[in-house]
Amino acid sequence: MTHSSLLRVQVAAPRRRLDVSLPAEVALWEILPEVLRGLGWSHDPSRTVLVTAGGKRLDPERGLLGQDVADGDVLTAAHHEEHRPAVLHDDLVEAVHERSREVLASWGPGSAERAGTLVPLTLVGLVLVVLLVSRLPAGTSAAVGAGALLVLAVTVLMTRAAGPSWAPVAGGWLGVPITMVTGWHASVAGGLGATEATVASGAAAAAVGLVAPVMASSRWPLSTPPLVVMAVWGLAEAVSTTVGPPRWEVLLVVLALGCLVATAVPSFAVGATVTRGQAEGSGVDVARLDADIFLAHRLVLSLQWSGTVLLLTVVPFVVPHGMAATAVLLVVLLVRLLRLRHQRSSTVVATGLVGAGVTVTWLVLHVVLHQPAWLPGVLGVLLAGALLIPLVVVAVPRGASGAWWGWLGDTAETVLVVSLPLTVTVTLAGERWFTW
């Protein structure tokens, strides 16, 4: 009896099916990564198994030949935990060897790809920090920045060619500030003045910011926050130059307005993605629905990240101007925290809490540097927050005294939202009075 060197099979995953011809005598572990990549499979290939229609788990150390797989069979890709047979071991050493492979994550092609992406991105980020804090000559800084941009572009292109990746998103976050710094130093080295250098570097950074969403594919909303923040700063600079108010005042107004309208963003995102084109009685395309849900989710995340980055960039300019201006930032921060109560996505809540923690840390650092007289009050607020915030975070999701917690949270959010425009008005009016 002769066997064909290739077997035509269909490999199924939750979102996609793939008709392929696989070599019958090659060990599955050698060909499985490419098959899973074609399926858009996100799990580690070393922890993935193929299962026949009869429920038999195929041995990755053997080929299809000899495992009762024939032409036309349907194989299903599954995580190894879902189809793990009961195994009895008579030898302790063998048991340790086998179980360690199951329990401990192995270093495979997926891990190597992630490391190959993370290392250059981390080093490029370090180069950006050095360029921001050092006083190198303009020509040297421009050359180093250009090299960093080249490394960043190569990394993004290589990872994008290998399949869906977070590298283009990280590339957008790093590319915009690196382009801004590099363009500014290159313009200064070329003899341009500070204003012309700022305009030229801003235009170059905007171009990179517009390319990043294209490279990020379905994750494009997550690469837009740097571009949004740069646009807000450009608007503040333009208003400050033409009308006269300081940039930090314009940024405070933008932050307040953004905080007030942010409540409508989740509904807008759902309306623009999930419910678009859905006709009554026409049925639901589950694949399209899933894609739209992810898009709406990423739009909400993008807005949240944009607000966090904008807060971080405004803090150094606001804290030196006194308690009233700093109070505006605190009100914005508290409103953003209270609105996390309405979220059900763990990613949105977690990133919101992390963003709030980073913002508070950055704020306290600048208080220490610029307003040391505030330190006793700041320490008291931090201790009170350390006591109350864990209580709220734990109690609200569990529904402890649900009506009471809901009423308290809604009341606090309403009071803060109403007081936000008043706080901004008092702050700006106070600045005008003192200046006058």
Image: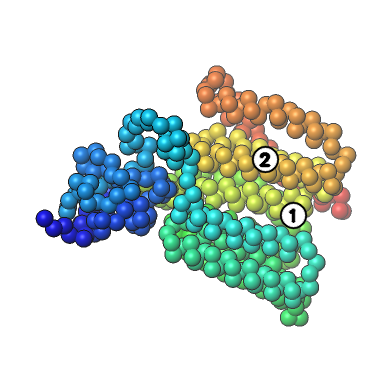
Identify which residue is drawn at 32% across, 37% down: 83
Category of crowding for the residue at label 1, using alpha-carbon neighbours closer than 10 angstroms: few (below 14), some (14–19), many (at least 20): many
User: Residue at point 83% right, 43% down?
Assistant: 368
228 up-or-down from 69: above or below: below
Amino acid type assigned to the residue bearing label 1 in the image: Trp
**Nearer to us: label 2 or label 1:** 2
- Label 1: which secondary element: helix
Spatial distance from mark 2 to mark 1, Cα to Cα?
22 Å
Quarter where residue 57 is shown:
top left
Which residue is situated farthest in the left direction here? 1
- Residue 137 position, x and y percent, is 79, 73
Which residue bears the numbered disc 2? 357
Q: Residue beneath label 1, please?
A: 248
Quick check: 124 left or right of 269?
right
Q: Is residue 352 left or right of residue 369?
A: left
Observer able to see residue 251: yes
